[in-house]
Image (tube, helix red, strand yellow):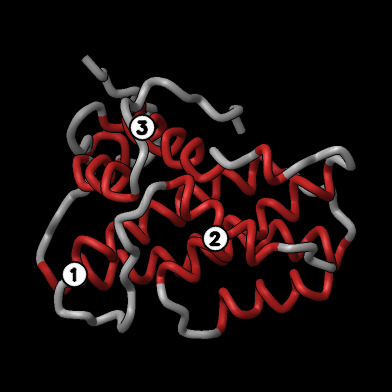
Amino acid sequence: MKKLELGAAGNMDTWADFTKGVMETFNSKNKNEDVWYAGTKAKIETAEFAQHIVKHLHHGKNLNVDNLIDEAGDVFYYLALIQELDADGFYTGYRIPNRELFDICSSAQLRYALFTDDDVRAKVEELLFKNKETFDVLVGIVSLLFWAKGKKSSGYSMMSDIALLRDICIANKAKLMRRHGTAYNKDFYKKGAKVEAATN
């Protein structure tokens, strides 16, 4: 995957900033369909994120942090959709407070501490099989990213990576803008189509 592409997605300081960008490119059908879609895709994308960690721990494959970061952005996209669409609380407790992205990242740092591989296995199982609130999913994934980056670099300091969540949200918004421009671009999803949306 490409490295994080920052700067093209505008200001991104709070979770509400990210959610606003997500909703600009969402194709709404009807209320029940939208909530089902967002909730299901959040689980699917979380599993895709976890798959990279499982392959590393179980099969000894190289841990690709860039791929993990890309998958994390996709998870956050669907968590943001749930935040906006699930006004009736179909997904119980799925609320993410409108907090500074730096503050949310700090919460992940506190929970991360020094994950062992067994801690990571337990966290992955928790994300996949236990009904967690959206905020816990968000913080859990960022915590696992800190662990992965630490595994790849012995000199890595998570305390100097306070902008990690903000950068992931900006990169995901930039990816959406390449696909859709400033509104939903249905042609992107046509089979075999290769569409780069205009952003001006």
Circle number at residue 86: none
Q: Of the residues shown, which amino acid type is indicated by label 1?
A: Glu
Q: In the image, what residue occupies the spot 45% across and 50% down?
A: 74
In which quadrant of the rendered view does residue 114 lie?
bottom right
- Is 169 positioned to the left or the right of 184 in the image? right
Q: Earlier in the sequence, mark 1 or mark 2?
A: 1
Q: Where is residue 39 in the image (x, y as percent from the top left)?
A: 34, 70
Q: In the image, what residue occupies the spot 34% across and 45% down?
A: 14
Q: In the image, what residue occupies the spot 50% across and 40% down?
A: 168
Mark 2 residue crowding within 10 angstroms, few (<14) / some (14–19) / many (20+): some
Q: Name the residue under label 3.
A: 193
Q: In the image, what residue occupies the spot 65% across and 79% down?
A: 125
Circle number at residue 107: 2
Please tell me whether residue 110 is drawn above or below residue 18 in the rendered image.
Answer: below
Q: Of the residues shown, which amino acid type is indicated by label 3?
A: Ala
Q: Of the residues shown, which amino acid type is indicated by label 2?
A: Ser
- Real-space Cα distance between discs 1 and 2? 32 Å
Mark 3 residue crowding within 10 angstroms, few (<14) / some (14–19) / many (20+): few
Disc 3 secondary structure class: loop
Q: Mark 1 points at which residue?
A: 33
- Real-space Cα distance between discs 3 and 1? 25 Å
Tell me the quadrant of the picture where the C terminus can be found.
Answer: top left
**Contact (Cβ within 8 Å) of mark 3 with mark 1:** no
